[in-house]
Amino acid sequence: MTALLHFLLTHRAELLRLVEQHVALVLLSTGVAAVLGIPAGILAFRRPQLGGPLLFVANVAQTIPSLALFGFLLPLPFIGGVGPRTALVTLTLYALLPIVRTTVGGLKSLDPAVVEAGLAMGMTPRQLLLMVELPLALPSIVAGLRVATVIGVGTATIAAAIGAGGLGEYIFRGLSMVDSTTILAGAIPAAVLALAADGGLAWFEHRLRSRRASSFRVPALALAVTIALGAVLAWSMSRGSAGTNVVVGSKNFTEQVVLGELMAQAIEAEGLPVVRKLNLGGTFICDRALRSGDIDLYVEYTGTAATAVFHQDVLHDPRQAFEQVRELYARAGLTALEPLGFNNTFAILVRTGDARRLGLRTIDDLRAVAGEWTPGFGYEFIQRADGYPGLSKTYGLSFRTAPRAMDLSLMYRALGDGQVDVVAGDATSAQIDALDLTALDDNQRYFPPYDAVPIIRTSALLRHPGIGRAMARLVGHVTEREMRAMNRAVDLEHRDPAEVARQFLAGIK
Amino acid sequence: MPSSAVVQFDVAAFGYPKRLPVLSGLTLSVEPGEIVVLVGRSGAGKSTILKLVNRLILPTSGAVRVEGRDTREWDAIRLRRRIGYVLQDVGLFPHMSVEENVGLVPRLERWAVERTRERAHALLELVDLPPATFAARRPSELSGGQRQRVGVARALAVGPPILLMDEPFGALDPVTRVELQREFLRIQRQLGTSVILVTHDMSEAFALAGRIGVLDAGGLVICETPQQVAASHDPRVRVLLDTMSRPPESSTS
C-alpha cells in the first residue's frame, strides 16, 4: 500500500497525463456513440424492420473481444493504425449497443395513453418525438449512457496495447514487469474513474426521473459539452505527435521498452524530435504499425521475424538467419540494421550452485544428471515440436519425471526454490542474476537465434540521416549481460526505463 | 346531403383485413352544440368512432365528414387541432406542469407566451382548479378527479368546436363523477361545443346526453333522445337499461 502511494506520488505528472488521456478517450468515444446511437435508436423504434438488423449488428460488435477488434482495425486506412484513432473507433463501437438498446427500450415503454394524447392533440411526428417521447425516454437513455461510460472506462485500459495511452499503460507495464504495484497504479485510478462516472450519471438519471427538469435542453447541452471537452483534450494531446518527428515503437515487455528508450534517446542526441509509442502490443501490432508508417522503428528478434512475421523456417546459423531476415525486410521497404549484440533466445537454466558442484557448462553436460532431475517448462515450450520434444531428442535427455508445466513468471522462482532443477527461460531475463542462475551453452545449436535487430523504415532512414548515426552508437554494443542488467534494474529494482537507458548511453559515450 | 351537421358519419365502416368489421356502416349526424353519447359494451366499436373523427384512422368504406368536409381531404394535423380529445386514461404528459399540459395546443399553434398563459389560467378557473394552487403542479401530484379536470381543460384550450370524449369519467368514484359531469355540462353549455362522448355506462349517458346512441355488433341500434331510448323495447337496448341501478327519469335536467 505504501509502495503504491509512493509510486503514485513519484509519478504524479505521468499519472495525470494518463488520466487525462483515459478521460479523453472515454468522453470522446461515449459522446460520439451517443450522437450516433440515440438517433439510431430512434430510427430503430420508428422503423421496427430496420431496428432488428440494427440491434443485431450492435450486438455482434459487442461480442468481439476488444483486443481482436483492435487487431481487425489496425490495418484499415483512416480509422485504423496505432494510436488513439483505432482506440476511439473500438470504444465507440462498444458504447453503441447499450445506448441504442436503452433508447429503443425507453421509447417502447412509454405510456400508450400519453402518446395517443399527443397524436390526438395534433402533434406532428417530430413534435411528438421532441416534446413527449424523448423527454420521457431520457432517463432510460441516460441509464444507457451510464452503462456505456463504465464499459468505456474499463475497455479503454486495453487501448494502451495499441499505443493509445491511458491508464492501461501502467497495467500493461506492470504485467510485463510482474509488478503488482504498477498494475494497481493503473487499475485503481481506472476503477475510481469508473465509480465516479457511474455515480455522477446515476445522480443525473435520478434527477431526471424525479421530473424536476422537464426540458431536455440541459442534457443536450451536457452532451455537447462532453464531446467538446473530449475533443479539446484529444487535440491538446495529439498536438506535436505528427509531422517530422521520428516515432520509436516497442513491444510490451520490459526489455523492449528499455530498447525503445535507448533508441529514442540516441536519436534525440542527434537533435531530432522523437515521439515514443512504447508498450504497443505484440509482434503483430508493431509490424503493422511499422509498415503503415505509424512508427518509424522498433527492435525485432531474428527468429521471431522469420517465423511470426514472414512465416519462414528459421536458419540455425545466426548470420544466415540475419541475412535471410534482412533480405525479406528490404523487399518491404524496411531496413534491418546490424544486430545490437545480444541474443534473446531460450536459455536452459540451472542453479549456479548445481552448475559449479557438478561442473555443468553445456546442455550436453546435462545428460549425466537428467535421470535425477525434474524439469519445469512453459506450456508452449512443452507443446511445440521445436521446444521440449526436439530438445530432449537432440541432446538425448531423459528426465526423472515428465516436465512440470508452469507459468513463465513462476518458473524462475520455482527453480530458485528448488521445486524444479532445470527450466527453459529467456536468455536476458532479469531473474538469472537475481536468483543466481546459470545458462548452459547450447553447444549443438538446437535453439534458433533471436538476435535483437533494429528495424527501420528505409524512407525515414533516408530522410533523417541522424537516425543512422544514432543507431551506429548502439549496434554491437548491447551484450546479453548488459541487457540482463538493464532488465533487472527495471524489473527488480523498479527503476525508470528512461533513466536506465540514459545511464547506459552515458557509459558508451 | 348538405346539412348544418358538425360531424357526419355516412355509412362509415371500419375493419381489419380478414376479420369481422369493427364498425359496419354507421350513419349519424351531430348538430352544433349537441351532446351525443354513444353507449355499448366493450368491443362495440366506441373508440373506433372517435378515432374516425380526428383521423387517427380512416374509414375502410363510406365517409366521415367534419364541418362538411371528408376527413380524407383534411390535413390530419389541422383537423386534430380543431378537435378536443379527452381519454379515460387522461394521458397527461407526466414531465410537464399542469399549466404546460393545458397550454400545449396553444403552444403548438404558436400563440404568444402571455396569451397561452392567460388562456391556461382561465381554463383552470373554469374547471375549478385555482391556478395559484395548481398551475405549477405535476400530474403525479393530482388526484384522479383533478387529473380528469386538467384533461378536459387541455382539450378545450384553443376553443375547439368539437370535443371527443372516451369514457372520460370512467375511473372516478361515484361522487366525484357526478360532480364532474354536472360541471362539464355547465362548461359545455357556456361554450356551445359539440360533443361526442362514448361510454359503457348508461347512467352517464342519461346524465349528459342530448341524444343517446346504442351500439351493438358494429352498428347503431337506436339514436334518439333519452326519453325515447328509455321507452325502447329493443332487447339490445333493454340489456343496457337493466344495468342501471336506478331507472331513468322521464326528464334529464
Image: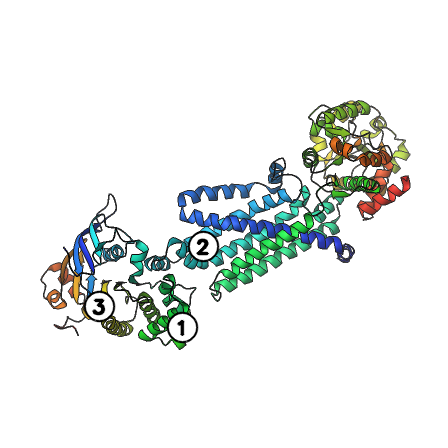
Q: Is residue A70 left or right of residue B89?
A: right
The disc placed on residue A290 is none
Q: Name the kind of residue labelled 3 in the image.
A: Glu
The disc placed on residue A106 is 2
State which quadrant residue B158 falls in.
bottom left
**SS of the residue under disc 2:** helix
Which x, y percent locates residue A222? 55, 59
Label 3–label 2 contact, CB within 8 A: no
Q: Is residue A72 left or right of residue A347?
A: left
Label 1–label 3 contact, CB within 8 A: no
As drawn, A11 above or below B211:
above
Q: Is residue A387 visible?
A: no
**SS of the residue under disc 3:** helix
Q: CA distance from mark 3 to mark 2?
A: 37 Å
Which x, y percent locates residue A111? 38, 58
**SS of the residue under disc 1:** loop
State which quadrant residue A118 falls in.
bottom left
Label 2–label 1 contact, CB within 8 A: no
**Residue density around tag 3, few if under 14, some if 14–19, many if 20 or more, within 10 Å:** many
Which x, y percent locates residue A281? 69, 40
Residue A337 vs residue A98, the one in the foreground? A337
* Same chain for the residues under marks 2 and 1 in the image: no
The disc placed on residue B135 is 1
Which residue was labeled with disc 3?
B204
Residue appearing at x 50%, y 60% in the figure? A217
Q: Name the kind of residue labelled 2 in the image.
A: Gly
